[in-house]
Image (cartoon, grey):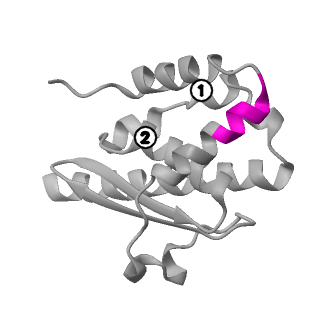
Amino acid sequence: MSQQSILEIEKEIIEDFALFDSWEDKYEYIIDLGKKLPALEEEYKVTDNKIKGCQSTVWLVATQDNGRIFFKADSDAVIVKGLVSMLIKVLSGHRPEEILEAKLDFIREIGMMTHLAQTRSNGLLAMIKQMKNYALAYQTIQGLEKK
């Protein structure tokens, strides 16, 4: 079985959100996504793994396996946990260059940025930035290992 591309996963999320008529239903869906996200092990809930710029506490860790990056995260806020769950669904398991090139248009297409409070929008952008920073770091390491 081949792995879905980032664009294919984004398309699925857009289709999922199209099923809901109201933003109240969409928020409930986001909360459900957060509830399904496995809890992050306590050893990772340290200051170094906290995302700066989020009003809520968000911990994010990344590991690399066979050239692909895998993310794990947790948050103390249910909606934020759902948001990071969506980002993990889209970006986890992909190569650093794929993550760096991802435009994440699904966020705009589902109307997320216009329905989040400014502080949550900033937090979402901070999560994306941190995930791309991990991708850049792993890409740099992979480049050095090839030399």
Q: Is residue 115 left or right of residue 96?
A: right
Asked if residue 118 is among those painted magenta in the image, a careful observer would answer no
Amino acid type assigned to the residue bearing label 1 in the image: Phe
User: Which numbered disc, 1 or 2, marks the residue closer to the eye?
Assistant: 2
* Residue 96 x %, y %: 34, 44
Do we see residue 147 in this rendering? Answer: no
Within 10 angstroms of label 2, few (less than 14), some, or many (20 or more) residues? Answer: some
Give the structural element (helix, strand or loop) at label 1: helix
Asked if residue 26 is among those painted magenta in the image, a careful observer would answer yes
Q: What quarter of the picture does the N terminus occupy?
A: top left
Residue 103: name its quadrant. Answer: top right
Q: What quarter of the picture does the C terminus occupy?
A: bottom left
**Residue at the image position 22 percent from the left and 58 percent from the top:** 144
Residue 80: name its quadrant. Answer: bottom right
The answer to whether residue 21 is above or below residue 121 is above
The answer to whether residue 65 is above or below residue 58 is above
Do we see residue 82 in this rendering? Answer: yes
Q: Marks 1 and 2, Cα distance to the nearest angstrom?
A: 12 Å
Q: Is residue 12 left or right of residue 129?
A: left
Residue that mark 2 sits on: 89
**Residue at the image position 47 percent from the left and 61 percent from the top:** 73
Q: Which residues are magenta?
A: 22-28
Q: Main secondary structure of the magenta part?
A: helix
Amino acid type assigned to the residue bearing label 2 in the image: Lys
Residue that mark 1 sits on: 106
